[in-house]
Image (tube, rainbow, N blue to C red):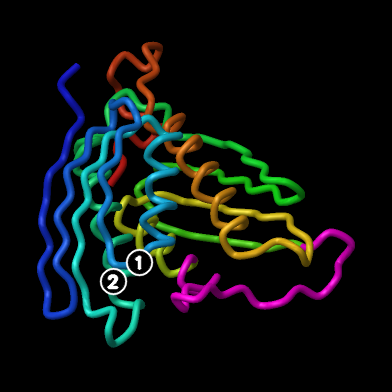
Amino acid sequence: MSERRASMERKSNETQIKVDLNVDGKGKAKIKTPIGLLSHMIELFTFHGFFDLNLEVTGDTHIDIHHTNEDIGIVLGKAFKKALGEEKAGIRRFGSAFAPMEATLGHCVVDISGRGYLKIDLISYGGNALPDLKNEEGYSIQHLEHFLESFAHQLGANIVVTVKRDAAADLHTVMETVFKSLGLALDQATAIDPRREGGVPSTKGIID
């Protein structure tokens, strides 16, 4: 099997992003972005997914973190899609994983179907109202959703994320369970299944 790697750069008036990805790695990460929390989360995603990832980012965060956050998701999604090849030959396609942290439980389900879609639900134990989550950088659940949506659409994956939490859970805790479970699920979905014998994992015979 040829190495499943991708390197790319994306430059705009808002962000400059360079990425080197090895899907079949050891979980080694070298992440440099101006959004501290997101950098840490991508490291967790990389480690638990056994991907090797070098990511260098600069952006107009002096204006807002929105552009940089979203563009990182776009480039990472494109890199994974490129590394997996046009036909996604031999991959398992589906992955599902849980990751707990104290009372918080994250669950990600991935289908590399060629159709990008994201659904994210935060569920409280007992149906209680929960506070909005935001950290000192201004990062919020809405930014998390935008990042994951950009990633899902560019990869061409259906991603469903569910997080169960209580009122004590902060943003860091919630995001850790999401990125760890996403890494685990994507590792499953991108794994080569020898029973597939290099074929396309779809009855249609194609994954766009």
Sooner in the amino-acid sequence: mark 2 or mark 1: 1
Based on the picture, tell me whether residue 141 belongs to the magenta stretch.
yes
Which residue matches tag 2?
A: 68
**Residue shown at 58% from the left, 36% from the top:** 97
Location of residue 189 by image quarter: top left
* Residue that appears at 74% across and 58% down: 165
For the point 48% across and 65% down, which residue is it?
A: 144
Between 69 and 161, which is closer to the camera in this rendering?
A: 69
Q: Secondary structure at mark 2?
A: helix
Q: Residue at x 12, y 80 (%)?
A: 13
**Extreme right residue here?**
126
- Do the residues bearing badges 2 and 1 touch, measured as CB atoms within 8 Å? yes
Q: Is residue 105 left or right of residue 184?
A: right
Numbered disc in front, either 2 or 1: 1
Real-space Cα distance between discs 2 and 1? 8 Å
Magenta segment, principal secondary structure?
A: loop
- Name the residue carrying label 1: 35
| Badge 2 amino acid | Thr
Task: Please state the extent of the stretch shown in magenta in the rendering.
Answer: 124-144
